Image (tube, grey):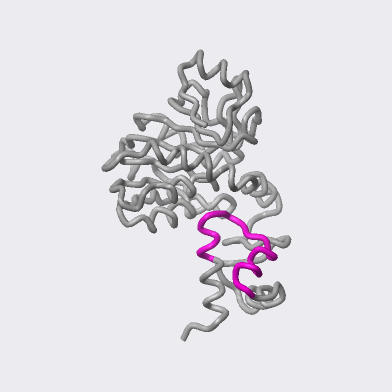
Amino acid sequence: METRRDERLAQLINALKRSDKLHLKEAAALLGVSEMTIRRDLNSESGPVVLLGGYIVLEPRSASHYLLSDQKTRLVEEKRKAARLAAGLAQPHQTLFFDCGTTTPWIIEAIDNDLPFTGVCYSLNTFLALQEKPGCRVILCGGEFHASNAIFKPLNLQDTLSNLCPDIAFYSAAGVHVRQGATCFNLDELPVKQWAMSMAQYHVLVVDHSKIGKVRPARMGDLSHFDAIVSDCRPDDEMVTYAKAQQIKLIY
């Protein structure tokens, strides 16, 4: 029999499908209970939802990855705006690849529920968003699970991915720089990102404006590889000039 605690945990898990963390105060307001009640819920027994540093997350993370997570969960409305613009590129019956990250689920949410498409993904939060789309055939690329960024790193890229040629690949990045290209925090993400960059027919980089000009440790590739860069507002002049020279479409 489901208890009230179970119901609250289910609501928290559903909320975390759109972001990899939720502040304790936000969770209390969402559920209409006190922060102490949520603390008791999470402390009473082990489960898929835990409290770390005042934030609720789906799985345990190291302190270093948690700080990186902070970088990816700011500017939610800006991410949603960019995501809505990107979602407008999807057409019926296409195969769409969705990268990991906290922006990508917003792209999926913005896709019309009546649109039939195949969604290819390799991260937990993206999979959870895709499985809610009634017109979507979901393909999750399995492998070793990495809790720090909730991705499945394939043990052998030939198992599933070699059989797929997406029409559009939607990428996330933590840094977008005219010289250093598109970068992210985690090296573990690179094999699937680079598979998509080699196999998809159209490449779309989707980022909020805070990522422009930043450089992170793991390099995805040159910006010239992307057909379009989508953001919530106009990039700086250097990026605009570079995109024009490289014939990259800017959407904002």
250 relative position to 166: left or right: right
45 relative position to 244: left or right: right
185 relative position to 201: left or right: right
Q: Residue at x 50, y 26 (%)?
A: 250
Name above or below for residue 17 compared with residue 29: above
Where, by quadrant of the figure, is residue 157 drawn? top left
Rendering coords of residue 15 (x, y %): 54, 62
Residue 184 magenta: no
Rendering coords of residue 45 (x, y %): 61, 77
| The magenta segment | 13-32
Rendering coords of residue 42 (x, y %): 64, 73
- Residue sitting at the far bottom: 1
- Residue sitting at the far left: 93
Name above or below for residue 252 compared with residue 98: above
- Residue sitting at the far top: 245
Toward the viewer: 157 or 164? Answer: 164
Q: Residue at x 59, y 29 (%)?
A: 176
Residue 25 magenta: yes
Where, by quadrant of the figure, is residue 165 drawn? top left
Q: How many marks?
A: 0
Toward the viewer: 178 or 133? Answer: 133
Rendering coords of residue 167 (x, y %): 32, 35
Q: Residue at x 48, y 83 (%)?
A: 2
Q: Residue at x 45, y 38 (%)?
A: 86
